[in-house]
């Protein structure tokens, strides 16, 4: 399948640089910050790095795990969990943006929304 | 205008009365004057024997007994009332102080009965009732020891109080004799079979029991005492303690012309009113409809009845009669007696299980159709008391013999479900099963501490605390010990699993003993267990090694404390709060060079705020080079050991508190625990280091150190409890080693030592048995674990600086190293920088968090 890709893709780092069940922060060209996570199952997700509840760019430093099988990160500020697939907060009325991810030749890329 | 209530006497019941009046008298209609004979605020007379050893009378003091900050209570100590002028409504003390009253409550208690034995007034003869009595006994024992190396003592009276006195003598290092006129010990509470076992168990504890005989004469014999018993035995003694019962102190009332009972005591009606409408009597001096009660619980009931009449104008409450059931641990032996223990009910039947091998005696008294429980006696093991006593008068759930049969598997015993709602669960505070159920189902109390706070159940002697989780469970509140959705085990169970299997990674532990991939609850909890156990199980001791890094909670993850804007604060260790000027200058220079906000902490060190993730290694490189190391302010670990300046400088100090604080801080630095650990060492009893607000606090004495455990400040402040006194340096450290390791092994996640103790079955006594008496035989293991921790300690920050892999994680942006986070900005306030928030509304309840 060939798809014409209009997105801007930003190289973040080699996949090996992200420890299993952990995250890193990356800067997009427009100044947006993304938090990129690698789960236990080796899935990679990218969401906004700013915790909308605590109001600081820290989500990449949260603990990665699951809630009833849903992959989540818990904010390091007040521990609200965010669904890594949808950006929805499981513990409050809030959400963060999500970003597409692709891995090319072992390098993780995050796409613009 | 306010009226005056005068309370004569200042014992436990008097204190309860004053507290109840002050709680119910919302308009402040009464001014309360308490006139006390004893020189100290009201104390726990029931627990008097615990004074031996600690010799700390303040520890016995009842909470609130100084009435600090309450202008409506006046407490006059050390000046007993000499007479009551009922006509003028005035009392006069021995010192001549006169006090008018509108209402008077007699709470004078009782005095020890001393049988008319010739020689009973000789020096060396004592009674057992007050702190001063115990001080006098101690002086005599010390004196005898200094002359002969060992003191010999005897107690006259083998009832409840006699055995308590025997315990006190034993705790002073004697092997006491107990002389009881009746054919068995505790004749009121136990029967012949129970008494025989009790005697055997007590004699096993180095006490010589003489039953069925009395003391016919005491004579002075070359500086000692010779007690001649009716059975011909003669005992050479240094001291004799009379503890043969009590008599109401009704002298004042007699002289004032109030009605007195045939066998003593001030006659009162079922509302505790005497023959004078302005005068009430409560506690042991009161003869309620002719009967005196020598237990504290009925006294408390009387106090509340009087308080309701005086303060709330409520005279509906009447004395319901008292449950004389007792459960005690005397000299370490369980004894319980409840209901019709002696089977006096017509047609009643007795079912006895007497197990000489196990050392237990259990008897149930049942109605003639064997269906209704009437009473019982338990000796050696009274664990069924809590469920059996509330069932008195109701139908038994099964065959009586099976209920007290030795538990083969889970067969024996009955559950809390079988109890009727009106069954009393907490006899100290008269709380029924129905009231507790109401608190759980209607007031939403879903934990043991909440039930305790709401109903007061379990806040007295604590013996019913073990029933509360069962009641929660029976109301459908799951008191699940599961750590989280990924582990059904409690933290303590996971600790044991790790200890036994020596699993060293989270992934292996969750694969074998849990489900899913973990969460922000179980990951840090397991990380803490792995860190506590690292030297024992052979795990990498650095918390950022391997897969451990991703398990660490917010602060541990970057070995610094995350602040509200995502920057970090840095706290180097300053052991004991002692720091050289040069090192202080380094802290200032580092803060200046990196532009950090600085603040002095409550733990006697310096906190540097506003560092970004990528600055942390650079800051620490400077600090480590200057000889600093991690202060673990970010960890559930030992924080600081605060100290006052101690005997080195202070004119009042009696020990080197700074030296001890430094030694302790260096010994326990880096120790990971279920929650943070704080400590302090004070160099004298003035307690300038506030050691009693710490998880473990040490206060110097002129003989050594007193160790206090399980205190904390914070939201629910709690003073630490004394667990050992006058110990030397070596013993102190050994006890703290054991205490900390026992806590680390058994506490729940994020449970401070104070709430851990609150939920620990058996409370402080159990803790003392485990870490002082080594009852579980685990002390050597606990000490070894601590020795391994001490031997393997290494500075975490140095570990990061020495390892490129760990260093690489301290990056703001993985694709733009060196670029600062553009969302972090600061403004200036009082000449220092402070964070500017992102303008996203703060979550409710977190605004203003410092």
Image (cartoon, coloured by chain):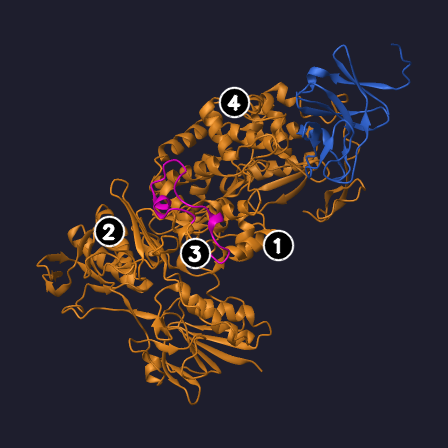
Determine which residue is flagged by label 4.
B504
Q: Which residue is drawn at 60% across and 74% down?
A: B27
Q: Which of marks 4 and 2 is nearer the N terminus?
A: 2
Determine whether the residue tagged by mark 3 lies in a helix, strand or loop.
loop
Q: Which of marks 2 and 3 is nearer the N terminus?
A: 2
Determine which residue is flagged by label 3.
B394
Camera-nearest residue between B431 and B108: B431
Q: Chain A is drawn in which colour?
A: blue
Q: What are the residue bounds of the magenta stretch? A: B397-426
Determine which residue is flagged by label 2.
B193
Tags 4 and 3 both on a single chain: yes
Q: Is residue B646 visible?
A: yes
- Where residue A62 appears, as percent x and y from the top left, is 68, 31
Tags 4 and 2 both on a single chain: yes
Q: Earlier in the sequence, mark 3 or mark 1?
A: 3
* Mark pair 4, 1: CA separation: 45 Å
Camera-nearest residue between B660 and B823: B823
């Amino acid at each position: 399948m060939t798809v014409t890709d209009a997105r801007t893709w930003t190289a973040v780092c080699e996949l090996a640089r992200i420890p299993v069940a952990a995250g890193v922060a990356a800067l997009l060209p427009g100044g947006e910050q993304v938090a990129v996570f690698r789960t236990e199952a080796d899935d990679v997700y990218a969401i906004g790095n700013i915790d909308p509840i605590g109001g600081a760019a820290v989500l990449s430093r949260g603990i990665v795990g699951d809630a009833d099988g849903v992959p989540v990160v818990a904010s390091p500020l007040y521990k609200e969990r965010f669904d890594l697939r949808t950006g929805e907060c499981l513990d409050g009325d809030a959400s963060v943006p999500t970003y597409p991810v692709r891995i090319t030749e072992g390098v993780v890329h995050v796409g613009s929304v | 205008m306010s009226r005056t209530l005068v309370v004569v006497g200042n014992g436990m019941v008097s204190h309860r009365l004053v507290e109840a009046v002050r709680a119910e008298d919302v308009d402040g209609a009464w001014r309360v004057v308490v006139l006390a004979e004893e020189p100290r605020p009201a104390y726990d007379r029931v627990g008097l024997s615990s004074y031996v050893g600690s010799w700390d009378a303040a520890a016995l003091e009842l909470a609130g007994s100084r009435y600090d900050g309450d202008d409506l209570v006046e407490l006059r100590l050390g000046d007993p009332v000499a007479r009551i002028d009922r006509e003028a409504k005035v009392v006069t003390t021995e010192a001549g102080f006169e006090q008018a009253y509108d209402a008077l409550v007699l709470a004078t208690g009782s005095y020890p009965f001393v049988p008319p034995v010739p020689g009973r007034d000789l020096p060396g003869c004592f009674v057992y009732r007050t702190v001063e009595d115990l001080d006098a006994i101690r002086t005599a024992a010390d004196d005898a020891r200094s002359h002969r190396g060992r003191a010999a003592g005897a107690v006259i009276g083998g009832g409840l109080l006699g055995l308590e006195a025997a315990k006190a003598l034993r705790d002073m290092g004697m092997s006491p004799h107990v002389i009881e006129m009746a054919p068995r010990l505790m004749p009121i509470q136990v029967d012949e079979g129970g008494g025989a076992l009790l005697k055997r168990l007590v004699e096993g504890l180095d006490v010589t029991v003489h039953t069925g005989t009395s003391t016919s004469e005491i004579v002075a014999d070359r500086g000692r005492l010779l007690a001649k018993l009716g059975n011909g035995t003669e005992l050479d003694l240094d001291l004799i303690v009379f503890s043969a019962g009590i008599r109401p102190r009704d002298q004042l009332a007699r002289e004032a012309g109030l009605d007195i009972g045939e066998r003593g005591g001030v006659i009162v009606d079922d509302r505790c009113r005497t023959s004078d409408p302005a005068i009430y009597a409560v506690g042991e001096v009161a003869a309620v409809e002719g009967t005196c009660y020598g237990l504290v619980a009925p006294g408390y009931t009387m106090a509340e009845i009087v308080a309701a009449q005086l303060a709330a104008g409520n005279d509906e409450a009447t004395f319901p009669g008292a449950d004389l059931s007792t459960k005690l641990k005397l000299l370490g032996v369980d004894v319980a007696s409840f209901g019709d223990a002696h089977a006096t009910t017509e047609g009643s039947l007795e079912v006895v299980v007497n197990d000489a091998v196990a050392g237990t005696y259990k008897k149930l008294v049942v109605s003639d159709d064997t269906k209704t429980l009437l009473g019982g006696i338990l000796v050696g093991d009274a664990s069924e008391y809590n469920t059996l006593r509330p069932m008195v008068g109701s139908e038994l759930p099964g065959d009586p013999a099976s209920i007290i049969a030795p538990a083969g598997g889970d067969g024996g015993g009955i559950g809390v479900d079988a109890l009727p709602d009106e069954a009393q669960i907490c006899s100290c505070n008269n709380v029924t099963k129905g009231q507790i159920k109401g608190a759980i189902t209607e007031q939403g109390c879903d934990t043991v501490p909440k039930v305790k706070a709401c109903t007061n159940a379990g806040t007295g002697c604590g013996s019913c605390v073990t029933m509360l989780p069962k009641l929660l469970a029976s109301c459908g509140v799951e008191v699940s010990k599961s750590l989280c959705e990924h582990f059904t085990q409690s933290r303590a169970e996971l600790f044991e699993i790790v200890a036994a299997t020596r699993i060293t990674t989270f992934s292996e532990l969750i694969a074998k003993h849990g489900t899913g991939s973990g969460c922000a609850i179980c990951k840090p909890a397991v990380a803490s267990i792995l860190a506590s156990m690292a030297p024992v199980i052979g795990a990498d001791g650095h918390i950022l090694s391997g897969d451990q890094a991703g398990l660490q909670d917010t602060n541990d993850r970057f070995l610094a404390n995350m602040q509200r804007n995502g920057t970090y604060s840095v706290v180097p260790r300053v052991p004991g709060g002692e720091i050289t000027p040069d090192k202080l200058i380094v802290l200032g220079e580092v803060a200046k060079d990196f532009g950090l906000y600085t603040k002095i902490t409550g733990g006697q060190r310096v906190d540097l705020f506003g560092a970004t993730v990528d600055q942390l290694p650079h800051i620490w490189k400077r600090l480590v080079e200057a000889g600093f190391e991690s202060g673990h302010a970010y960890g559930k670990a030992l924080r600081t050991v605060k100290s006052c300046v101690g005997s080195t400088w202070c004119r009042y100090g009696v020990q080197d508190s700074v030296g001890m604080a430094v030694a302790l801080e260096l010994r326990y630095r880096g120790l990971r625990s279920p929650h943070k650990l704080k400590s302090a060492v004070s160099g004298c009893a003035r307690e300038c280091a506030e050691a009693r607000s710490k998880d473990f606090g040490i206060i110097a004495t002129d003989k050594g150190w007193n160790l206090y455990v399980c205190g904390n400040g914070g939201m629910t402040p709690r003073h630490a409890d004394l667990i050992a006194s006058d110990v030397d340096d070596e013993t102190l450290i050994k006890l703290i080693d054991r205490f900390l390791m026992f806590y680390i092994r058994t506490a729940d996640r994020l449970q401070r030592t104070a709430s851990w103790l609150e939920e620990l079955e058996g409370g402080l006594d159990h803790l003392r048995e485990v870490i002082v008496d080594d009852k579980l035989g685990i002390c050597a293991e606990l000490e070894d674990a601590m020795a391994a921790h001490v031997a393997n300690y290494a500075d975490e920050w140095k570990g990061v600086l020495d390892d490129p892999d760990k260093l690489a994680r301290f990056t703001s942006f993985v694709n733009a190293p060196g670029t600062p986070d553009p969302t972090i900005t600061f403004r200036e306030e009082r000449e220092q920088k402070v964070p500017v928030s992102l303008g996203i509304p703060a979550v409710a309840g977190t605004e203003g968090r410092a």
